[in-house]
Image (tube, rainbow, N blue to C red):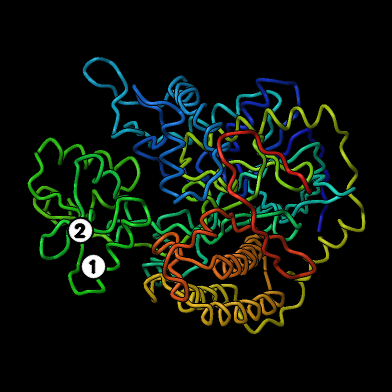
Amino acid sequence: MKVKKLDTDILIIGGGTAGCYAALTAAENSSASVLICEKAHIKRSGCLAAGVNALNAYIVEGKTPSFYADYAMNDAAGIARYDLLLTMSERLNKVTARLEKMGLVILKDENGRYAARGNRNLKINGENIKPLLASAVEGLENVKVLNRVNIIDYAMADGRVAGAYGIGIEDGAFYVIRAGAVLIATGGAAGIYKPNNPGFSRHKMWYPPFNTGAGYAMGIRAGAEMTTFEMRFIALRCKDTIAPTGTLAQGVGAKQINSLGEVYETRYGLTTSERVYGTVNENQEGRGPCYLKTEGITPEQDESLMKAYLNMAPSQTLKWIESGLAPSRQNVEIEGTEPYIVGGHTASGYWVDTNRATTLKGLYAAGDVAGGCPQKYVTGALAEGEIAALSMLGYIRDNEPADIPEEDIALHIAEAEKFTGGNNSLFTTEQLEEAMQTVMDSYAGGIKTNYRFTGAQLEIARQKIKQLVILSGRLHADDPQELMYIYELRERLTVALSVIAHLEARKETRWHSFAENLDHPEKSSEFGKKFVNSRLENGEIRIILRDITEGGEPYEHSDR
C-alpha cells in the first residue's frame, strides 16, 4: 500500500456535528492547524446528513441550564454526569444563535421570538443544516478536510494517542497522521442488532447505518475507560417508515393509544424508555397495534406535519400522500426500533472529564461518542465540540507531539494487506454481519425477545460473537470500499462484546426496554448510585463501578 504521512496540530476524526463545530472553535481561537478526516463527505455526513426539523436541546424563555440538566438526569433515571450536563446546557443557546447566523432557518412566532416546541425545543427548517456547517468549516484557512478517508485505529506513542491510521477509500493509500491532540467525534453504533426492516430495506433505520461504532471500538481496543453501554437507545418510531414520533407527540400533542382507543402512555410513564416499554407491553398483552392519535387534528396541523417531515423523514409525508389519508384522517401506527448505542440520547460512550478529555492522554471526545451526558442532540453535540476544542488548544500548548513508532505503522499496514491478499475466506462480510445481528437479536435483548434478556442468554451471545470475531479475521476485500466494510464489521463486533458485558454487569432493570434484565427485573438502590464502566485489559473486559457524583463540580481523571 502507498503510505501517506501527514502532520497536524489537531486531528478531528469524524466530520459530523461535533467535529465541524470543534474545527470552527479551534480555528477561531488559534492559528493551530486542524485536519478533519471523514469517511463519507463532510457536506452530507453524520446524523445531520438528511436534515432535522427541530433543535431538541434549547433553554427556552423562563428556563435555565439547570432545568435542562435536571430533565436529562431524570430521564436517565439518575445515571448521568451533572457536570457534563450543566456545562453543555450553558452553551445551548449560544451555539443555536451561531447556527442562525450561518443561515439556519429557525421558525418565529407572531412576536418575532423563536417558535418553541414544548419546554426544550425549537422548530426549524433544517434540511440544509449539515451543508451550512460544512460550508463554514471549508471556508477556514487553517482547516483541511480529508473526505473519503476511513480512520481504522489510533496511533499510540509514549503512553498517549499520537495520531491515527486511515485508509483512503478512493485512492487506496494508507494514511499515517501525527497530531498534537486528537478529537474522536465519529458518532454512535447502528447495525449491531437486527433491524425492523429486512433485506434490501434493512438500512431504513432510526440511526445512520454508516455509524458503526468506530470511535467506540478504537477506544476499547486502546484501553480507554468506557461507560454505560448497557443504557441502549431504542427509538419509538412510525411503523415501516421509521420516521420520528416526537414531531407528532410534541408538535400536535398526539397521545399514545392502543387498538381499543385507550391512552396508555400515562400508565407506564413518560420518560423515553417508558414510552417504548408501554408500546411493547400493550402489544404483548393483546391490545395492539399501538398508535399516536392524530385523527381529528386541524387542516393547518395536517399541513404543518407534512412540511415538518420533509425536513427529516420525507418517506412519512410520501406515505400520507400515497394513501390519500392525511394524519387527521388516520392515526399513525408506532413501533420500537432495534437497540442502538448512542451517547447523544443516552449516557453511552467514553468516560470523560469535564473538559471532555478521555482516559487516554491526548484524546478528547465529543458528541455521540462522549458518555455520561444524555439528551444532547444537535446543539449539545455542538457545545461539546466547542468544549473539547478549547481543551485541546490548552493541551497542545503544553505538550509536544510524539513520534509514531515505525514498527506500529508496519503492523497496521500488514493487517490491512492481509485482508486484501489471497482470497481464502469461506464467508462474506455481509453474511457475518447478518449472523452478528441474529445473535444479538436472539440472545442480547433485541426486537425478537421484546428487548428482554437473561444472564444465560448473554453468555451465549458472548461466545457466538467471539466466534464471529475470529471468522472476521479471515475475510477478503477486493478494493478499499470492501476493506472499509470489513473494518466496520469488526468495529461492530468489538462494541457488541462491550454491550454484552455491560448488560450483564448492571444487576437491575433501571430502564425498561433499554436494559430489561429478566434475572433482575427491579431497580436496585446499589446500582442506582453507580456507573457501570469498563476497560479492556489483556484481551478481557474488566468492569469498573464508579460512584454517581453529586452536583456539577468539575471532574478530573484520577487514575489514567
Classify mark 1: helix, strand or loop.
helix
Q: For the point 83% across and 65% down, which residue is it? A: 414
Residue type for callout 2:
Tyr
Q: For the point 58% across and 31% down, which residue is it? A: 21
Q: Estimate the x, y position of residue 119 in percent, counting from the top left.
A: 32, 33
Q: For the point 19% across and 67% down, which residue is it? A: 289
**In the drawing, does residue 196 fall left or right of residue 239?**
right
Q: Of the numbered discs in the image, which one, if any, rests on residue 264?
A: 2
Q: Estimate the x, y position of residue 256 in percent, counting from the top left.
A: 21, 55
Quadrant assignment, res 219: bottom right
Q: Is residue 23 above or below residue 111?
A: below
- Residue ID for mark 1: 282
Looking at the image, which is closer to me, 243 or 449?
A: 449
Task: For residue 105, say whether it is visible.
Answer: no
Quadrant assignment, res 307: top left
- The answer to whether the residue labelled 2 contacts the one labelled 1, judged by CB atoms less than 8 Å apart, is yes
Can you name the residue that lies furthest to the top here? 111
Residue type for callout 1:
Glu
